[in-house]
């Protein structure tokens, strides 16, 4: 019996060793290939998708629906790799530094500062956007021109449109609801310990402080010109003052901040804090359907508006399967897939497709989606949308927070 | 590290067979595998920290805000975790040793937390000790029965490292038990019996007879627990506070989230922490040498 | 003259026995039971000691994701076994040497040999990531095993050394005097006597490797599945039920390994005609 056990182990080990040998550079010339040739090349391959894995609903949608569609339509196997973006971006940069061909990453979900980082290191494959039929047919190129103020130049394509929202339980009585960043400090003081935000090294935590920054310094318009260190030096202290003022009234008196959004989620679900935040418009509805939130949870946005941006997919410069990555990236822009993603029962992430360009049947798919009572109407959201500011501000803010707020 | 073996002077216990010692030195060569790997890793960090080729990265590293506070906090958390784990582990080992040997088998159940990864231990700490955890629920119930029972105050995230310490103690106590138990087993039980028969109290017997003989086990467990808790990442990530923060959390953030241009600063700090670790280990080696030599003579 | 310890300190033994069981129940059993309860919890609002409703959801989740979980568990078990095997191989002779000789600076050398297990891994692993990529070891199980041996070998070294401290060189001389060949001596004399030390060292190495999360991600790049990697998002998330179920599953592997080891040892010694002594 032990012998047989050992043989099985040896066999598995051997298969792993062989898998090592197959990770070769793809010398497929995708630049000049037609879409049909790309599909043919991708047929029967495996493609890896590296992405943030902190939300089980998103993971399930990718591993379930997307993987099945990819298999069914193109006979491509999806290998989702849930990983902190910092780690896989660092890995990609290390592979670039080492000059490794035939890497480990095909498609990645990245945005903003990570796109800038990898693009400047020439660690991305492209431009590839023009190769994707769904991008050419359904996406308004104007909406995909910039990512956090940095030109995309076709090196990444959008696949979701997000807007920051706050969530609260309408059945819980906390007196009143803060409807603006101006009145938030007052609310926090009256409800000590019931509010906090994730540390800004977290994606959502970073968005929260950026949001406050925009709101209390007179709107995003002034920042859109590009990185202006003087403007930053002038305005950032206002943010630190604001955040330091509320810190003593936050959860744990500001000595601790949730390390990740998922921790804040957990605290909100168990009633330790009264307000949660998310970068998916229909997140609350999605969680009600999952049974994680009570039915009475609702969404709100601040008067000063909330950040709206897109998230993107990009391909690693040494992707072992570029054809597969192109096919997956294209599939994520398929109207049926986008509609499935938009449904709160799946994820609730809004579409990047241009409704004008869709066929009536496809448009009907989106009209049929029930965003639920917990989600704000698209009009309300649109009215509150604030444009994303350049990623240099984002980096500076999230780093300086640790100096001026945490380690003060 | 490996090359150092050449300067080691022979004090071979095998009646001075110098050639036997020298003839066997080749046996140390397999240690080149980890030795070279470690050296390669550290050299990379070193060269990264020397870009540009001066000490500016080190100056910047030492000027990082909150650095000193976080180092002291890490030392404090590691020290408390070590003292408590060692005390509990020793007491537990003594208890198991005192009981009939049939209990030794059951005593292995105490090793369960050792099997759990630190992240799972962190999860357990949250499950039990958070403001809405199991203990809080129990207290809430009790306060209904006994009106005097005050409501539960979670010890976590208060800035005193309680969550991290709880986790480390839960995970390290069985580790101490594992290292101390074999040493204890080598002590004949009639030592204690004699002591008791002479009328000494059990505590005095333990303190005077047993404890001195446990020093090698205890010191080995202590240094491992101390240095590890000082620098490990997993547990502080889940149950650690933001301010003060454990040095590991501080390092990871510095390395991964700051712009690439600031990597040398992070590398310099990494190297300093590595040297700190080496220094602790060396201090330990100096401190235990007399005890180990005594043990060898026994 | 041999007095059984039970009669020896009978006056205080009662209290000790009660204390022993009490500790075992409070520190080990109750947390495990609550993990089990949590794994069957439907909703569990705050002030309730037990869940408000029960559900098989988390176990169903495990069942429906069995393939991924089994893959992760199997892969983790595989590279951890690999680490245990390789550390045993390269620690064998050095440990023997360190046990048989005493020399100046030995304590320092042995303490230094501990460092890779103790200092934060990030201090040396970032360079190794680049090196492994250059050597085509990244994303391979070989690379993962190698990095894991680096942070776990000190436990193996210590354990084997302890084993050899109890092994007298005179045994070898005795065997040689009997005219036995070197291989036979190794198989019949040395191996049976130091095997327990190898196994206990292997157990610790296995556990360290099996629990490692960051290094497997760093070198494995996500292409080598790992169970801790699978577990972490759940442990930091809000789904306590699935987190508890997966933690229980996690315990299963070392437990099975422990049993396997016991059976293996017993068989081995029975075949060799040696009764297990020194084991309690």
Image (spheres, coloured by chain):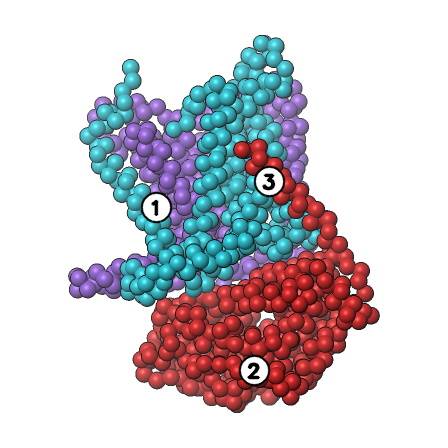
Q: Earlier in the sequence, mark 3 or mark 2?
A: 3
Horizontal side of A261 relative to A293 (left or right) equals right
| B186 over A313 or under it: above or below | above
Q: Outermost residue toward the right? A: A32
Q: Have a look at marks 2 and 1 and say if they share a chain.
A: no
Distance of label 2 from label 1 (alpha carbons): 53 Å
Distance of label 3 from label 2 (alpha carbons): 50 Å
Residue A9, numbered circle: 3
Chain identifier for the purple-coloured part of the image: B
Badges 3 and 2: C-beta atoms under 8 Å apart? no
Badges 2 and 1: C-beta atoms under 8 Å apart? no
Residue at 62%, 60% (x, y): give it: A79
The quadrant holding residue A374 is bottom left
Q: Position of residue B183 (x, y in %)?
A: 41, 30
Between C230 and B50, the one nearer to me in the picture: C230
Q: Which residue is mark 1?
A: C28
| Secondary structure type for disc 1 | helix
Q: Colour of chain A?
A: red
Q: Which residue is mark 2?
A: A366
| C112 over A126 or under it: above or below | above
Instruction: Assign the N terminus of chain C to one quadrant of the image.
Output: top left
- How crowded is the residue under tag 3: few (<14 C-alpha within 10 Å), some, or many (20+)? some
Q: Position of residue C194 (x, y in %)?
A: 52, 26
Chain identifier for the cyan-coloured part of the image: C
């Amino acid at each position: 019996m032990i012998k047989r056990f050992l043989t099985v182990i040896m066999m598995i080990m051997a298969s792993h060793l062989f898998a090592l040998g197959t990770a070769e550079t793809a010398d497929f010339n995708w630049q000049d290939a037609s879409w049909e040739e790309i599909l043919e090349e991708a047929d029967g391959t495996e493609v890896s998708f590296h992405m943030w894995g902190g939300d089980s609903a998103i993971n399930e949608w990718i591993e379930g629906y997307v993987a099945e569609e990819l298999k069914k339509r193109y006979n491509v196997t999806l290998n989702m790799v849930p990983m902190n973006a910092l780690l896989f971006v660092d890995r990609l940069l290390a592979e670039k530094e080492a000059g490794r061909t035939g890497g480990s990453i095909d498609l990645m979900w990245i945005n903003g500062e990570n796109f800038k980082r990898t693009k400047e290191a020439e660690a991305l494959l492209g431009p590839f956007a023009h190769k994707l039929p769904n991008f050419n047919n359904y996406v308004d190129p104007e909406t995909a021109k910039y990512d956090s103020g940095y030109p995309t130049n076709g090196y990444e394509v959008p696949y979701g449109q997000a807007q920051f929202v706050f969530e609260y339980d309408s059945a819980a009585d906390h007196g009143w609801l803060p409807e603006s960043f101006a009145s938030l400090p007052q609310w926090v003081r009256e409800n000590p310990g019931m509010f906090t935000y994730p540390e800004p090294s977290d994606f959502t935590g970073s968005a929260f402080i950026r949001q406050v920054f925009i709101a209390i310094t007179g709107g995003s318009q002034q920042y859109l010109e590009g990185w202006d260190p003087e403007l930053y030096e002038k305005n950032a202290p206002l943010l630190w003052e604001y955040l330091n003022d509320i810190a003593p009234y936050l959860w744990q008196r500001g000595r601790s901040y949730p390390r990740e959004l998922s921790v804040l989620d957990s605290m909100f679900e168990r009633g330790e804090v009264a307000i949660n935040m998310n970068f998916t418009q229909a997140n609350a509805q999605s969680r009600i359907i999952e049974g994680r939130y009570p039915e009475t949870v609702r969404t709100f946005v601040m008067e000063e508006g909330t950040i709206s941006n897109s998230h993107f997919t990009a391909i690693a410069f040494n992707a072992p399967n570029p054809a597969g990555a192109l096919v997956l990236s294209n599939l994520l822009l398929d109207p049926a897939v986008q509609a499935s993603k938009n449904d709160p029962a799946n994820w609730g992430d809004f579409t990047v497709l241009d409704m004008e360009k869709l066929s009536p049947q496809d448009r009907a798919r989106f009209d049929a989606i029930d965003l639920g009572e917990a989600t704000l109407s698209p009009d309300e959201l649109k009215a509150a949308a604030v444009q994303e500011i350049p990623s240099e501000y984002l980096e500076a803010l999230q780093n300086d927070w640790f100096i001026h707020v945490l380690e003060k | 590290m490996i090359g150092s073996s050449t300067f080691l002077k022979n004090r071979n216990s095998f009646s001075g067979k110098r050639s036997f010692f020298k003839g066997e030195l080749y046996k140390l060569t397999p240690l080149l595998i980890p030795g070279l790997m470690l050296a390669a890793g550290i050299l990379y960090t070193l060269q990264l920290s020397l870009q540009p080729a001066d000490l500016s990265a080190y100056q910047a590293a030492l000027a990082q805000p909150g650095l000193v506070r976080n180092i002291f906090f890490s030392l404090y958390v590691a020290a408390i975790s070590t003292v408590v784990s060692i005390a509990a582990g020793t007491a537990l080992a003594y208890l198991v040793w005192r009981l009939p040997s049939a209990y030794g088998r059951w005593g292995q159940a105490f090793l369960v937390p050792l099997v759990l990864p630190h992240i799972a231990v962190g999860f357990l700490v949250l499950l039990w000790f958070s403001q809405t955890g199991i203990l809080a629920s129990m207290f809430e119930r009790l306060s209904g029965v006994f009106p005097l029972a005050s409501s539960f105050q979670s010890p976590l995230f208060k800035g005193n490292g309680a969550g991290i310490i709880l986790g480390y103690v839960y995970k390290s106590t069985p580790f101490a038990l594992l290292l101390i138990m074999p040493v204890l087993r080598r002590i004949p039980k009639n030592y204690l019996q004699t002591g008791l028969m002479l009328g000494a109290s059990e505590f005095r017997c333990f303190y005077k007879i047993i404890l001195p003989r446990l020093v090698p086990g205890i010191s080995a467990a202590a240094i491992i627990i101390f240095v590890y808790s000082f620098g490990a990442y997993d547990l502080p990530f889940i149950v650690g506070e933001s301010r003060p923060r454990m040095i590991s959390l501080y390092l990871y953030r510095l390395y991964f989230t700051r712009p690439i241009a600031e990597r040398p600063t992070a590398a310099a700090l990494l190297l300093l922490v590595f040297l700190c670790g080496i220094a602790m280990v060396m201090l330990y080696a100096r401190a235990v040498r007399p005890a180990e030599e005594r043990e060898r003579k026994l | 003259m041999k007095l059984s310890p039970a009669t020896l300190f009978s006056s205080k033994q009662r209290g000790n026995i009660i204390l022993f069981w009490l500790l075992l129940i409070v520190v080990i059993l109750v947390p495990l039971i609550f993990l089990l309860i949590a794994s069957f919890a439907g909703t569990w609002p705050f002030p309730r000691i037990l869940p408000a409703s029960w559900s098989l959801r988390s176990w169903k989740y495990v069942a429906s994701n069995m393939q991924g979980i089994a893959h992760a568990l199997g892969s983790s078990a595989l590279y951890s076994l690999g680490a245990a095997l390789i550390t045993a191989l390269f620690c064998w002779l050095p440990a023997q040497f360190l046990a048989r000789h005493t020399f100046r600076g030995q304590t320092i050398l042995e303490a230094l040999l501990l460092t890779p297990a103790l200092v934060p891994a990030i201090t040396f692993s970032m360079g190794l990531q680049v090196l492994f990529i250059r050597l085509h070891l990244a994303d391979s199980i070989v690379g993962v095993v190698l990095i894991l041996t680096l942070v776990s070998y000190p436990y193996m070294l210590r354990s084997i050394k302890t084993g050899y401290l109890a092994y007298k060189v005179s045994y070898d001389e005795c065997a040689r005097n009997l005219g036995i060949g070197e291989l036979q001596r190794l198989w019949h004399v040395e191996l049976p006597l130091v095997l327990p030390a190898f196994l206990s060292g292997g157990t610790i190495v296995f556990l360290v490797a099996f629990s490692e999360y960051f290094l497997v991600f760093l070198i494995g790049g996500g292409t080598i599945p790992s169970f801790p990697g699978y577990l972490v998002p759940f442990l930091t998330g809000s789904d306590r039920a699935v987190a508890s179920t997966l933690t229980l599953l996690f315990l299963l592997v070392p437990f099975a390994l422990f049993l396997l080891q016991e059976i293996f040892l017993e068989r081995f010694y029975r075949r060799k005609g040696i009764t297990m002594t020194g084991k309690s």
